[in-house]
Amino acid sequence: MAGDWEETTLGECAVWLSGGTPFKGNEAFWSGPIPWVSAKDMKSFRLHDAEDHISPLAVGNGGKLVPAGTILLLVRGMTLHNDVPICMITREMAFNQDIKALQPAKNVDGAFLAYWLLANKPELLASVDHAGHGTGRLVTDTLKEKQVLLPPLAKQKAIAAVLGALDDKIELNRRMNATLEAMARALFQSWFVDFDPVRAKLDGREPTGLDPETAALFSESFQDSEVGHIPSGWKITTLGACIGFRSGFSFKSQDWQESGVPVVKIGSVKPGIIDLSQVSYVSEEIAQLAARYRLSTGDMLIGMTGYVGEVGLVPPSNNPPLLNQRVGKFVMPKAGTESLAFWYCTTRQPEFRAFVEARSHGTAQANVSGEAIMEFPLVAPAPEILVAFNRECQPMLDRILSNHAESRTLAILRDTLLPKLLRGEMSSALAVDLA
């Protein structure tokens, strides 16, 4: 350890702020542009937005604003039994009372402090206690007492720059994936919701952005149906009439262990991509009993408990995971339309999520059956149009999976470098060479 590193505490490294919740009954508080962060939003190290937003009227009326660069740390919630979410916000945001905001002291680099928290997640997780009703809690006074070895500010910035460069690459992949998914979903909206190619033909125009062969696949008229006008030759059907569905294997509590073959559980199902860093493990012997539930890259899964209706793709992995109960797998057809692009875009629509949530049940947490999921109604195009769409969009999904795999590799490298850099065991210059 370099002699110019000093011992301090986490409490001395930052100003600690508490969050709040504006009155839910005042709609004027909840109709603005300011992201309001809660536990459900804290899914990435760099946080760009939140599901809920408040108005400037809510600031000072329960809404607590903090600037870009502030660190958010979840200190209360069921999530804390499995993970301690840590985020750096990239814009001004508000946050709720289950979160603490850390604004770095003058002698502390904010990014360095965030990486220190990330490197010390295991210790933070070990400090979680129970607040009742299964809720995890991190006591602020206990957190503030944790010892921190703090290098001079210049070294903090150098260390943060090395780690930040890796996160920059991860962030670039995230933006690329967001763009690719938006492109695929925009094309789906145009072809299968707004029926733009058919409307263009009906108006005597050439469909925009389509080659002549693809344009020729679309009809020039609409027909009546129970859901309104749909393109001639298309039909109203259900998801279950088009693709299959399989639930996961029922593992026993004694099957779980610290390492081995990964198992995708409810907590692994994230929107868009399955999170293989949030899995449980079973032995090879147990995995052989559940061999038919082994997953492959690109399989499409859905959560059936908790955040029901969440759909994600299985990313590449050197250790392919198994499927647990209460997570469903969509089984693709095998008649020339086995690409899942159309079905992925179908299940990523807000209408699909709303449909599944409406058919869920349960008081403690929502549950939905596979049968209810597969009753989702849809307008099925002519098979050749579905094939054309898959030909356009499947490469986008493949690239998304590839980018995700690269980001996972970068994250592993970052997490390997983290403790060495933060203990002064490796210089930032050497770390740059390794990265």
Image (cartoon, rainbow, N blue to C red):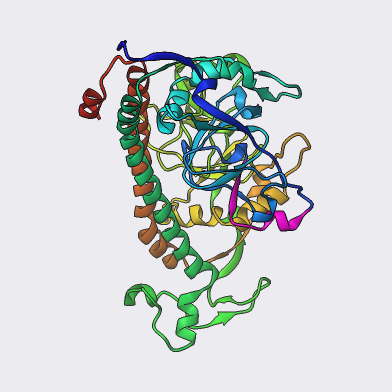
Q: Is residue 111 above or below residue 194?
A: above
* Residue 8 percent location from the top left of the image: 47, 15
Q: Is residue 29 magenta?
A: yes
Q: Which residues are magenta?
A: 26-37
Residue 334, given in percent of the width and then of the height, sits at 44, 50
Residue 128 in percent (x, y) is at 62, 18
For the question of whether residue 281 can be seen, the reply is no
At a point 47% along the width and 19% down the height, the residue shown is: 120
- Is 154 included in the stretch rendered in magenta? no
Closer-to-camera residue (68/289):
68
Snapshot quadrant of residue 124: top right
Q: Position of residue 13 (x, y in %)?
A: 49, 24
**Quadrant location of the C terminus?**
top left
Q: Quadrant of the N terminus?
A: top left
Q: 221 or 13: nearer the eye?
A: 13
- Quarter of the view holding residue 426: top left
Q: Residue at x 43, y 52 (%)?
A: 178
Residue drawn at the location 45% of the way across and 52% of the way down = 340
Give the left or right position of residue 35, taking residue 335 as reference: right
How many badges with numbers are in the image? Answer: 0
For the residue pair 425 and 17, the one nearer the viewer reads as 17
Q: Is residue 412 left or right of residue 26?
A: left
